[in-house]
Image (spheres, coloured by chain):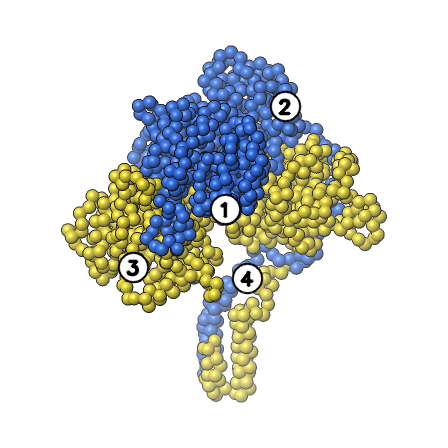
Chain colours: A yellow, B blue
Amino acid sequence: MCASVKYNIRGPALIPRMKTKHRIYYITLFSIVLLGLIATGMFQFWPHSIESSSDWSVQKRSIRDVPVVRLPADSPVPERGDLSCRMHTCFDVYRCGFNPKNKIKVYIYSLKKYVDDVGVPVSSTISQEYNELLTAVADSDYYTEDIARACLFIPSIDLLNQNALRVKETAQALAQLSRWDRGTNHLLFNMLPGGPPDYNTALDVPRDRALLAGGGFSTWTYRQGYDVSIPVYSPLSAEVDLPEKGPGPRRYFLLSSQMALHPEYREELAALQARHGEAVLVLDKCTNLSEGIPAARKRCHKHQVFDYPQVLQEATFCVVLRGARLGQAVLSDVLRAGCIPVIIADSYILPFSEVLDWKRASVAVPEEKMSDVYSILQSIPQRQIEEMQRQARWFWEAYFQSIKAIALATLQIINDRIYPYAAISYEDWNDPPSVKWGSVSNPLFLPLIPPQSQGFTAIVLTYDRVESLFRVITEVSKVPSLSKLLVVWNNQNKNPPDDSLWPKIRVPLKVVRTAENKLSNRFFPYDEIETEAVLAIDDDIIMLTSDELQFGYEVWREFPDRLVGYPGRLHLWDHEMSKWKYESEWTNEVSMVLTGAAFYHKYFNYLYTYKMPGDIKNWVDAHMNCEDIAMNFLVANVTGKAVIKVTPRKKFKCPECTAIDGLSLDQTHMVERSECINKFASVFGTMPLKVVEHRADPVLYKDDFPEKLKSFPNIGSL
Amino acid sequence: MQSWRRKSLWLALLTSWLLVLLGLFPLFRLSVPTSPRAGAPQGWPHWLDAELLQSFAKPGELLEDGPRPPQVLRGGSCNWGACFDTSKCRGGGLKVFVYPAAGPVSETRRRILASVEGSRYHTLSAAEACLLLLLSPDTSTGECDPVPPQWDGGRNHLVLSLHPAPCPRTFQLGQAMVAEASPTVDTFRPGFDVALPLLPEAHPLRGGAPGQLRQHSPRPGVALLALAEDGGRWHVAGTDFSACPWDGRCEQDRGPKQTHPGATLPNATFCLIPGRGPDVLHFLQALQAGCIPVLLSPRWELPFSEVIDWTKAAIVADERLPLQVLTALQEMPLTRVLALRQQTQFLWDAYFSSVEKVIHTTLEIIQDRIFGPSAHPSLLWNSPPGAILALPTFSPSPSDFPFYHLQQGSRPLGRFSALIWGGAPGQPPLKLIQAVAGSQHCAQILVLWSSEKPPPTRWPKTAVPLTVIDGHRKVSDRFFPYSAISTDAILSLDAHSSLSTSEVDFAFVVWQSFPERMVGFLTWSHFWDEARGGWGYTAKRTNEFSMVLTSAAFYHRYYHTLFTHALPKALRTLADEAPTCVDVLMNFLVASVTKSPPIKVPYGMWHQEARPPPLEPGGPGLRQEPQPAAQNCINQMAAGFGHMPLVSSRFRLDPVLFKDPVSVLRKKYRSLEKP
């Protein structure tokens, strides 16, 4: 733009001999063009501040303007759905291909209006919900505009309600889609299947191999592992503002709010009400409502009028009975109210039953057992009821709340089938956020004692204290279960001593040179570590006896998921300062062990190096301190378990500092360590360390027993 | 001249504008991508009149869709609600009757019969039963059974066939459920039929071989993939995956071939099992070996798929994308590999390692269907110790069990109940009651009076409530789940036990860290006696131990429920006959559930010196050397469990400052240090 301004100045100077008239003409022309250009540029550079992006960029169109497609009467009709379809027979997985993100690509056909031979529309062009659904898909990560790269195709033909379309003609419309190919990899959404008089439980539109996401499948129409069962969306979800009501006892024990019930069922319910009185409330349509009040929002019992869906919040259990269709929109309202649905619809495939554990949020009662429903429900303990209420509400929030939630859950289910190795777990689908937050899944959960023969790998981190290092190597090599010794040489300015100078030991000794002097190098998952057990040991820990180290290894074998170490430390809450404090005095409790001498599983090296939360790793390397505290946090957080301190306290030669410069240094050290604890607790968002009052000693430690007969006699000597 | 000038001027202008435009154009382009769908007609449009769109259903349509009477059952199709009559199961819960076999009985059939008869659901009367079990005919006998007498169209029947039936059925299955090995997905009725694993002929009756996994993470350098071959063999694939090694199409490129003869187990991280092959035996082999099964489009239903979440232990992938599967396996995060490996072992040990476990799991699934809302939650099925050992009747909430505190983010209750088993005439154990009541964690004291003589009328006054329960005179009664026990922790005691308050306090604090284990003071250890060719155990002080005496031990009250309701009756009777056996039995039970040793805490030697060893035959003595009769009980127990569950430990948990050279005043449990 700068350049153009220059031209603006220089322009007239180039034509000095022009007539004034011309000159003015040119100048005006120039300025107009330039102004226009600048204006365009301005628009292009700040489109967001001027108008919202969607309005600016996405073409604004009206639904009335969509192209019309005329279907000849003899155009092909797809075959009826194939009941034997499974993913590996009817789904073309090659279209999904290799995908580093493990995400399927979904294409949406553009909207068209279909009319038959004589120009009568096949169906209403699109409903509000289906428009929302397609918008949600288009806004998601699954969406692609490139039809050639898509693995799943969604027609824009609205099939949500079978009553709103003409079956044969709609099928013809499907068949002429550009990539139809017998419906392979096409996903159809339908919430209200069937029509009078026999109400099929799946969409009647012939659809060949297409996948059906249907609301109201029965065991006979549902193709396990192929179709997806979805909820029937309740428009009340968006219309009505219903504040959440926590779990707990409610006024009515059992409530029925459905209006269209078969007389037989209604009789059954009336009998229940007669037997149990106030606890059961059976509502019906209001007959004498004044004009203007939407009947959908009112329910009546005799002359009493109740607001719907608010009344659902007054009940612990709500009946969801089969109507002509198996899928009922009332299920969504009931879940939202935190009322536990009592599903009385034999053979109904509950929404998303492939992944959702409905036992946790609902009670299914066989139709035959309807008269027993009260006693069945009464046998459920109050604690379980509250759990189920919470679960019901969570299901609504996560999977029923909006059309978007329904669409995305459907796509996720299909995605998980195609990329099973990256699938979402049962817990992710079913556990409410509060449970997920509090629960720990130990990565080494199997109770297993690794064989002693495997031994352990000792890792010594060293900088340049060669003499002390050699002593440590000699001492550690006396431990019977040592299988390999790894020296991590952290000094880039100095070469490790010559091979001939190293102590001769009975196990392989490897030296690893590092690229940078970082404390994290101690916890790197080196390929050289072949055993599961790792002993991290500093190059100045020479006071541990062979018995003590061997015993530590034995204890680790019984606790392979924990840090098993020698010097123990404690974290304390400082009430005055309102923060955590590090404690190394003689305390009755332990919450950390120093990794200057500790056994642990090598998997934690992997976690430390690749999965440490936040910036902790860099923080440790920058401060050259607290790598051990970080490791304690990490292990406690991932396993939910405390450390094990082994053997009595020893006089460690200043285990945490490199020089003893008296009290002042010691104090700055403690302050720094306390800071680490506070920093890590804030990164983890919680204090994962567990405090315990025990340590592990050999069974016969200090017992009145001949020392010779003890397995580990040399323990605790100073 | 002028025209030339003008022309050149226009030209200069034009070029300059062109330059300007060219310079600006890329800038426009740069500015555009900030909005994702700018200018593109693709994507789903935001319709101008979206607000005016109709809802998919007319206002009344969702509310009333034409009521319909209850449906009549369609022929051939059955589901649980329609075809099983649960009213017969009310009261006694699941009661199972097995049709007696006519004619000679094969070994497999004998095993199945034995395991049903050994289960807690078995009944001898067909009238009382709510489930009638029909074993499908064997291969060896070759005869097909006639329609059984109580058939009734197959209602409430379970037709069990561990092996594919050799002859066509002579009668219609009707409403009977089918439990068969590896049913095809097309005929399997989810929620009604039960999918069983295909067991090898020589599968053990009970106990069974333990899982092969010895370490959590795969050994470095172990093969990534083993491929199932015909005849129960495995082909360990090399690291070169340039082509599809299992396809047969690339036969020439097979890498180092290590065919294992016979039914050896694969040694690899993943085990690839083709879904088409009839040889599904491979699946169980992989599970046992801790080799993660990778199933390629299996046409058969995975065993117990109704309750077992196989996504936690196996990978079901599409056979049409071999290279993609391979890449996914190679790139799978270590954390997930670890989780899958461990889960295979847990599932093998909990549900598959013996015929008895398979049968009990099947019955447990049926029982869960009957229970409805009070069935096992998924967590109980899919995490250790598994649903056979976690009884849903104990509590609906997993956090009441000792096993799920981590997953639930909960903790055991912070108090304990002392349960004193006594019956000796004379004075109540004053000192013991005072020591226990002195503990800050004690919630109540229960005295289980088990003598013919009435209990003393006067009991010492204590800070906590003391209740006397009139027990029966059987030793196994001390492990009955009394409703009076209100806490998670139980401190089990004998009238002649001797403990100090600090010992109790410290042991309880330790138990809170290990709520699933037993925490005790006195220990025994078991050993293999070469001379006698059997197990033995000793009370001698040794460097390791595997049992703690229940005359002074903390454990979770759930073990009372398990002891009374899950143990075979024969084992409990055995314990009643030889009272010292009861300790062995309890330790066996807890060890078989936790697969871990108990925990020992310090116990002052002065207790023993203070009182002579009790001579009473009824109570398990402290430090008594087990009598020869009792020595034999460990072998009977081992036979009853089918294996030796006990695990040895080599450490004791002491207070952090125990006997450290520091002022006694600093120590919390200083009285533990008395010599």
Dot 3 crowding, Cα within 10 Å, few <14, some 14–19, many 20+: few
Mark 4 on the same chain as mark 1: yes
* Labels 3 & 4 near each other (Cβ < 8 A): no
The answer to whether residue B526 is visible is no
Q: Nearer the viewer, residue B623 or A465?
A: B623
According to the image, label 1 marks what residue? B438
According to the image, label 3 marks what residue? A654
Residue A408, image x, y percentages:
57, 49
Label 3 sits on a secondary structure element that is loop
Label 4 sits on a secondary structure element that is loop
Instruction: Give the spatial CA distance, label 4 vs label 1.
Output: 77 Å
Dot 2 crowding, Cα within 10 Å, few <14, some 14–19, many 20+: some
* Labels 1 & 3 near each other (Cβ < 8 A): no
Q: Which label's residue is closer to the chain start, 4 or 2? A: 4
Q: Nearer the viewer, residue B105 or A654?
A: A654
Position of residue A283 relative to residue B182, above or below, is below
Q: Which mark is residue B58?
A: none
Report the residue at 19% width, 56% height from top: A467
* Labels 4 & 2 near each other (Cβ < 8 A): no
